[in-house]
Amino acid sequence: MVGTIEHRDVFLSKIANQLGRSPKTEMVRPTWQYQPQDRILKETTKDELVKVLTEQCKNIHTDIVISNTANLPADLQKIVENYGGKSVITWKDERFKSYGLSSLMTEQWPQANIKLYEWDSEQPAENIRQAEKANIGITISEITLAESGTAVLFSSKDKGRSVSFLPENSIILIPKSTIVPRMTQAARLISDKVRTGEPIASCINFITGPSNSADIEMILIVGVHGPMKATYIVVEDQ
Amino acid sequence: MAMKTSDDRFNHRVSKELENTFMRGAVSSAQERFQTRRLKQADELGHWEEWRSHGEEIRKHVLENLDYYLYQLSENVSKRGGHVYFAQTAKEATDYIQSIAKKNKATKIVKSKSMVTEEIDLNAALEELGCEVIETDLGEYILQVADHEPPSHIVAPALHKNKEQIRDIFKEKQGYAKSEKPEEIALYVREKLRNEYLTADIGITGCNFAIAESGSITLVTNEGNADLVTALPKTQITVMGMERIVPTFEEMEVLVSLLTRSAVGQKLTSYITTLTGIKDEGDTDGPEEFHLVIVDNGRSDILGSEFQPILQCIRCAACVNACPVYRHVGGHSYGSIYSGPVGVVLSPLLGGYEDFKELPYASTLCGACTDACPVKIPLHQLIHRHRQVIVENEGKAPVSEKLLMKAFGLGASSPTLYKMATKMASPAMAPFTKDQKISNGPGPLKAWTEARDFPAPNKDNFREWFKHRQKGGDE
């Protein structure tokens, strides 16, 4: 479906007129005189980036666990228990299986009375109901920014937006290969997609730790409208 | 509320605010914390001046080519199923949004923090239709429950209230029964608002940066409220000031890096969200209907004028946090939703000199705002230019300088005033200096110079004074 555009011509004509020229409909991409962003964490190895990310997690009230595919089920289980178990919502995502989490999620959790709900594109209302009452939401980062401690999530029909912010606790799996120095690299990756005409996700979330606010007397409160607590699990996937 | 937040006279507002001892303490401690964090982050980032220059060149380029980028943005929003409405006036914007609310038979609307919706008085327009409008940013929600009090700071709207006052507001209005602890208040609001997100018909947001190449909008928050506002209701309306746009994700990233550091001293806030059009096919959350309302409301008149640089603003409030006058008088004294140096420049341009002609005098022209600005807006020069325009038009300054200096709490007759004012004013005083004497000084100095010429200030600088004062010095 294509949306409508109303009152554009007169609006843009006034702008052009104020700028003393006729409206522009073509532009060459500008070359910038300054590019300070390229210097940051330049030529840093993945292992060094993991260290930067780990250090930054201290500033953003986020726990971080360094794991690998062999230890992942046990590490995840520990975190889920720490958060009090009860109920977990996840995306419908093949990667959970490839990380060897199937038996944990579909066999061990039901036995331990931990309820698992997998996002289901056929069940719109149920998805929200489940996400709202889930104790824990588990998602996977597509691009991870070491400098700021940020996970980047792309929404899709199987990867609902609400999984990362409705449950009280958030666990984000960070494939080690997704770690880049900073937002600069993520912006370029997304911009490249746009330039080649590949559609980008309708919602891209850059998430940096749990929700927080300092609106009352500038006192930091961790846990406001989104999750109250967050853990990242870095998974060695290469 | 509209842009103008008070019908009281400027001098009365200032005098009243100066008696609010909690507010004054809160403002000065907030200023210090915001400043310290900002400087720490700038330092950690490194090459801050280069970052500022890059921010400036991006913002300047966008303003010079604004019609092109808005064209591209609207094409791309439309391709992703969104509707774009260009509104030249506040009324056109609110009429359009009212029509969407009516068409959707909306009764409940949730909102995330947005200055432009305050500017166009959107809540009143929607309440007129019988809609319940709920602000979801914690600070904004507190003010809304407190009988729609105006914000006193662009980033921390409820800065002037202490936790006991906030507890009492919720107690009186909603029967809140817990303590004044911020965590308990926040938890109460979290639970209270959860249900509102889930049952709202429309979600309304502002826009930190629209991205022309993809037709996306970017929202910057810490609380996560904007994500709930946009993921849960069926209809999303985003209102943006027409200048809040960047060419691509790459420039968005640079400006977000500058914004979060300058506003709150964070590398990134907890949630940076880019939303593109309506939800994708098969998605079960996200809006089915999306409207982008692009608002002019006086901005195009600033384009091409000597005040054009104010449109570079990314609303970080670093200038507010650096301003010695804001420190003394607080946000409500400005009588505008835009307070501090940015408010001094912007309010008369958007709201007219008639209502805001005193504001350019709420400044010592010390230039601390200009130094703090991450996109290099020459704020104090624009403030000075406002004064020239006002005097050119009216033949005289609109406020009694004597009352004003008294009102600012900057002292009336003690030598402290002169010492302080001259220390702050050194570079800014250049236009008034003749033969190393000041003969027609601005602001607090005017009453002095009317009686006698003073020796020109030595080249001391403001930060030295500010630093000394923070340590409890009395000069």
Image: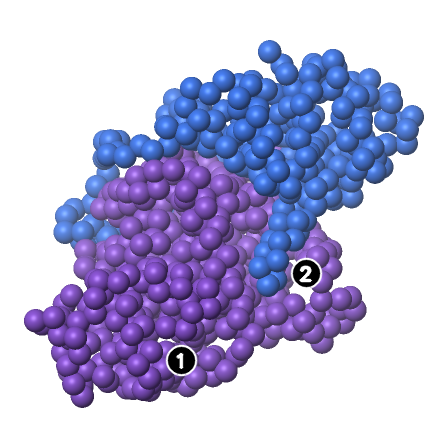
Query: Which colour represents chain B?
Result: purple
The disc label shown at residue B409, or none: 1
Residue A15 visible somewhere in the drawing: yes
Question: What residue would you read off at disc 2?
Answer: B182
Residue B6 sits in quarter = bottom left
Q: Nearer the viewer, residue B330 or A159?
A: B330
Residue B294 visible somewhere in the drawing: no
Q: Could you give the CA–CA distance between mark 1 and mark 2, rounded to whole angstroms?
A: 31 Å
Mark 1 residue type:
Gly
| Residue A104 left/right relative to A67 | right
Q: Quadrant of the C terminus of chain B?
A: bottom left
Q: Which chain is blue?
A: A
Mark 2 residue type:
Pro
Of tags 1 and 2, the one toward the viewer is 1
Which of the two labelled residues, at mark 1 and mark 2, occupies the earlier sequence position?
A: 2
Disc 1: which chain?
B
Residue A46 vertical placement versus B3 (above, below): above
| Residue A24 left/right relative to B233 | left
